[in-house]
Image (spheres, rainbow, N blue to C red):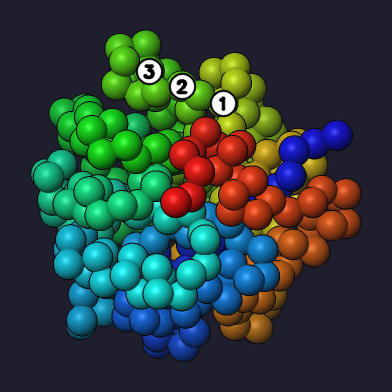
C-alpha cells in the first residue's frame, strides 16, 4: 500500500505576473489566502516565494516575515517552505537565506547550477554549503531541488560530509528549458539515483505537469503543483492554485492514494510535530 500523497503548492514563483495570469498571488495577504484555500483542498506543504511591493522577486526577510505572519493568522497548519533560489535576488548565502530564522519548517536548496531560459541558475559550491549550514543551525529541513541528476549526487556528497541530515528529501524539477527534460524515463532514472530511505516529489513545467505528476503518484512519490509551474489548467484555460490542487487530489483518488494532512506529512518528512 503506497504512502499517503503529500501535495505541495507553489503559488507564486519568481516568473508569473498578474498580466500573465490574473490569479497570481503577489502580496503577503494574497499569498496567504491562496495557501489557506489550497490547504483546505488538500495541500500540506507551501513552497513560498516572496515579492517586493513592485511585484519583483525578493529574498527580503521582512517580506517573508509578513507572509509567514499572514499564514499564521489563518491557522492552516500547512508546512511552510521558503525559497532560497538564485532567481529571488541576491547572490550571497546570507542574502538568499535571510528568512531562515523566521520559523519556517523547510527551505529549498538547489545543490548545483543549471540553465534557465534567460540566465544561469547559479549555485556555487560555497553558497550551497553556507545555505546548508544555515538550515542546520535554524532547524530547517532542506528540500533538495534537482534540475538535473548531478544535483542528487551533490546532495549525497554533502550528506556524507555531515552538512545535510538524512533522510534527504528531493524535488525533481523537470521540463525547465535548459535543464532535465520532463519524461517518465528521466523521472525513473532520477528516483533510482536518490539515496535509500529518501523521500521525493516531482514537479514539471507547463503541459508536462499532468503526465509527470501522474507518473510520480503511480511510483509512490509526492507531487507539487501551482502557478509557479503552470499558468494554464488546460489549453486556453487560465489556472488558479486551487484548481491545480483540486486536480492533483483527484489524480490521487483515481490512483487509489489518500492525501496526507500537514501533520501526517510532518511525520513522513521527519519534521517536528506542529506546536
In space, the residues marked 1 and 2 are separated at their CA atoms by: 7 Å
Q: Where in the figure is residue 91, as x and y percent of width and height?
A: 13, 48
Residue indicated by mark 3: 159
Among the two numbered marks 3 and 1 on one chain, the one whose residue lies closer to the N terminus: 3
Question: Residue 198's mark?
Answer: 1
- Element at label 2: loop
Drawn side of residue 182 relative to residue 32, left or right: right
Instruction: Indicate the quadrant where residue 66 lies.
Output: bottom left
Drawn side of residue 241 relative to residue 134, left or right: right
CB of mark 2 within 8 Å of CB of mark 3? Answer: yes
> Between 255 and 124, which is closer to the camera in this rendering?
255
CB of mark 3 within 8 Å of CB of mark 1? Answer: no
In space, the residues marked 3 and 1 are separated at their CA atoms by: 12 Å
Q: Where in the figure is residue 153, as x and y percent of width and height?
A: 43, 20
Q: Residue at x 22, y 48 (%)?
A: 101
Can residue 193 be seen here? no
Drawn side of residue 38 relative to residue 145, left or right: right
The number of numbered badges drawn on the structure is 3
Question: Residue 166's mark?
Answer: 2
Q: Residue at x 73, y 54 (%)?
A: 259
- Element at label 3: helix
- Element at label 1: loop
CB of mark 1 within 8 Å of CB of mark 2? Answer: yes
Q: Where in the figure is residue 34, as x and y percent of width and height?
A: 50, 76
Q: Where in the figure is residue 60, as x and y percent of width and height?
A: 17, 63
Q: Residue at x 61, y 37 (%)?
A: 268
- Tell me if mark 1 has few (under 14), some (14-19) or many (20+) residues whose alpha carbon lies within 10 angstroms of its own: few
> Between 3 and 251, which is closer to the camera in this rendering?
3
Amino acid at each position: 500500500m503506497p504512502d499517503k500523497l503529500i501535495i505541495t503548492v507553489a503559488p507564486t514563483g519568481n516568473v508569473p505576473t498578474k498580466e500573465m495570469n490574473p490569479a497570481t498571488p503577489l502580496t503577503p495577504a494574497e499569498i496567504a489566502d491562496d495557501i489557506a484555500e489550497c490547504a483546505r483542498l488538500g495541500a500540506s506543504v507551501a513552497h513560498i516565494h516572496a515579492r517586493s511591493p513592485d511585484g519583483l522577486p525578493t529574498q527580503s526577510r521582512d517580506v517573508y516575515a509578513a507572509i509567514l505572519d499572514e499564514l499564521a493568522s489563518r491557522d492552516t497548519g500547512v508546512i511552510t517552505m521558503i525559497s532560497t533560489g538564485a532567481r529571488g535576488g541576491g547572490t550571497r548565502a546570507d542574502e538568499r537565506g535571510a528568512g531562515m530564522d523566521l520559523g519556517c519548517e523547510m527551505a529549498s536548496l538547489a545543490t548545483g547550477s543549471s540553465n534557465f531560459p534567460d540566465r544561469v541558475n547559479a549555485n556555487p559550491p560555497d553558497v550551497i554549503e553556507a545555505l546548508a549550514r544555515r538550515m542546520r543551525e535554524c532547524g530547517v529541513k532542506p528540500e533538495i531541488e534537482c534540475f538535473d541528476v548531478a544535483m542528487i549526487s551533490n546532495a549525497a556528497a554533502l550528506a556524507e560530509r555531515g552538512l545535510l541530515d538524512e533522510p534527504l528529501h528531493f524535488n525533481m524539477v523537470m521540463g525547465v528549458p535548459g535543464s532535465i527534460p520532463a519524461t517518465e524515463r528521466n523521472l525513473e532514472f532520477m528516483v533510482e539515483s536518490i539515496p535509500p530511505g529518501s523521500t521525493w516529489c516531482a514537479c514539471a513545467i507547463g503541459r508536462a505537469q499532468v503526465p509527470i505528476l501522474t507518473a510520480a503518484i503511480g511510483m509512490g512519490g509526492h507531487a507539487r503543483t501551482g502557478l509557479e509551474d503552470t499558468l494554464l489548467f488546460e489549453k486556453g484555460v487560465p489556472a488558479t492554485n486551487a484548481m491545480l490542487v483540486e486536480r492533483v487530489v483527484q489524480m490521487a483518488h483515481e490512483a487509489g492514494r489518500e492525501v496526507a494532512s500537514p501533520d501526517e506529512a510532518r511525520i513522513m518528512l521527519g519534521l517536528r510535530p506542529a506546536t
